[in-house]
Amino acid sequence: MTDSSSLEVPESVDAARTAFRAWLSSNSVELEKFRETGGDVTDVFERLRHLQRMLFDSGWIRLGWPESIGGLGGTAILRSIVSEELAAAGYPPPFSFATQEVLGPAVAEFARPELAADVLPRLLCGDETWCQGFSEPGAGSDLASLRLRAVRTDSGWRVSGEKVWTSWAQFADRCVLLARTGSPDSAHRGISAFLLDMDTPGIEISPLRSMNGDEEFCSLYFDEVEIPEERLLGDVDGGWAVAMYVLAGERGAAAWQRQIWLRTRLNDLAGAKASVIADSVVGESLELLTALRLLSRRTVRALSAGVPVGSTTSLDKLAMSTAEKYLFDAALNGVGDDIVFGGDATAKAWRNDYLYSRASSIYGGAAEIQRNIIAERLLGLPR
Ligand SMILES: Cc1cc2nc3c(=O)[nH]c(=O)nc-3n(C[C@H](O)[C@H](O)[C@H](O)COP(=O)(O)OP(=O)(O)OC[C@H]3O[C@@H](n4cnc5c(N)ncnc54)[C@H](O)[C@@H]3O)c2cc1C
């Protein structure tokens, strides 16, 4: 296996792709164990953590990140080829890949340089996982109404309140947390963002079971949790900018990884033994995924060039949930009995993916909210 010191930053996306394909092929024996996707969540996490470490040690996952925070440099767009080529070769995305693209860029942008240099290498190499503490009971779509309170102390902040739907918080080492630091009616102008260590005393984590059977979400209860001043991300009362940066990553760059995976599931569906999918349904699904890919490619390129993406990522998010739901509706119709009753790993995977596809029009901002944003901010329609 190559180590990262021998990996030169490729000059172009095409060169990176060619070099990564060659690396995948020459390491295929060692990578074989990562093709397995089943097992309980802890096993899956552990397996993917190893894959992440292997990609970090060989340098691939460090491409497109600044050297000051553990990367090898190069443009951010180089990051997009890794998940794409892994999926094309039949491997899952590594452990914290989605978190990396959703939370990593915001911490790189808004954390103090010493903090970013300390924590980002740990995220990239898979030693740590992070979670996103935004939503609260009563503050999901209307995120600006969040109430979890942070008050000033001599050395930082003391936080009390509640978060909900925090994905994989039970495994997380750190949390990007939004808290109210302004007056109760200060809306988005009175929110600050923090990077909180999840082992800080006063945090209670209660996993919640979702309909696919996984305990993906958690409720988080904060009872006078102390956060040092240096963990503030951005400015006091400037957390909305951090939140929007995170959501641009979640609605944009993370959609890039999702569309690649959805395309492999469409291939699986079209080739499934028990499948009775009409060509027109496969065609429609392919069209939706192609539209998503083109939108997402535009966003990934803009983010890489440092061009603000504004509200356009709502198009990506809406296209993603539309394509995902269409694909798994087609799967339910085409291989229905297997999805509903099958006991083998393939049937379980279809069942899980169908159920999870229902959430695609909720997480990262519900479909109705994306439609509102598109109508008001992109099309200029009245509220
Ligand atoms: C799988 C999954 C993972 C998640 N992970 C995280 C996470 O890690 N961290 C985190 O902070 N949150 C997470 N969430 C929460 C997610 O961000 C919220 O569920 C989402 O923002 C919607 O908020 P809500 O659930 O409070 O629904 P509500 O805001 O109560 O909305 C309920 C319904 O009303 C509609 N609605 C609300 N307001 C309007 C309006 N103005 N116009 C039209 N329709 C409207 C919505 O579209 C929706 O259909 C996750 C959710 C899911 C499903």
Image: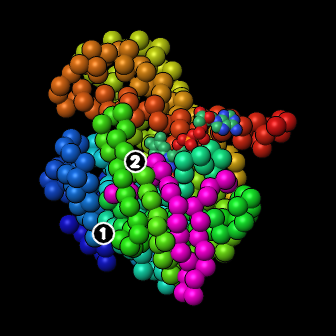
Q: Please name the residue shown 54% across and 47% down the image.
A: 137
Q: In which quarter of the image is residue 365?
A: top right
Considering the numbered disc 2 on the image, is that residue within a helix, a strand or a loop? strand
Does residue 48 show up magenta in the picture?
no
Quadrant into which the N terminus falls: bottom left
- Left-right relation of 206 to 73: left
Q: Please name the residue shown 49% across and 36% down the image.
A: 360
| Disc 2 target residue | 217
Three-letter residue code for mark 1: Asp
Residue 369 appears in view: yes
Find residue 127 and name its label. 1
- Left-right relation of 339 to 202: left
Crowding at dot 1, Cα within 10 Å, few <14 / some 14-19 / many 20+, comes out as: some
Considering the numbered disc 1 on the image, is that residue within a helix, a strand or a loop? loop
* Stretch in magenta: 144-170
Three-letter residue code for mark 2: Phe
Classify the position of ligand 1 by quadrant: top left, top right, bottom left or bottom right: top right
Task: Using the image, determine if residue 238 lies above or below residue 380.
Answer: below
Residue 211 in percent (x, y) is at 36, 33
Q: In which quarter of the image is residue 129?
A: bottom left
Q: Please name the residue shown 31% across and 78% down the image.
A: 5
Task: Using the image, determine if residue 62 lies above or below residue 141.
Answer: below
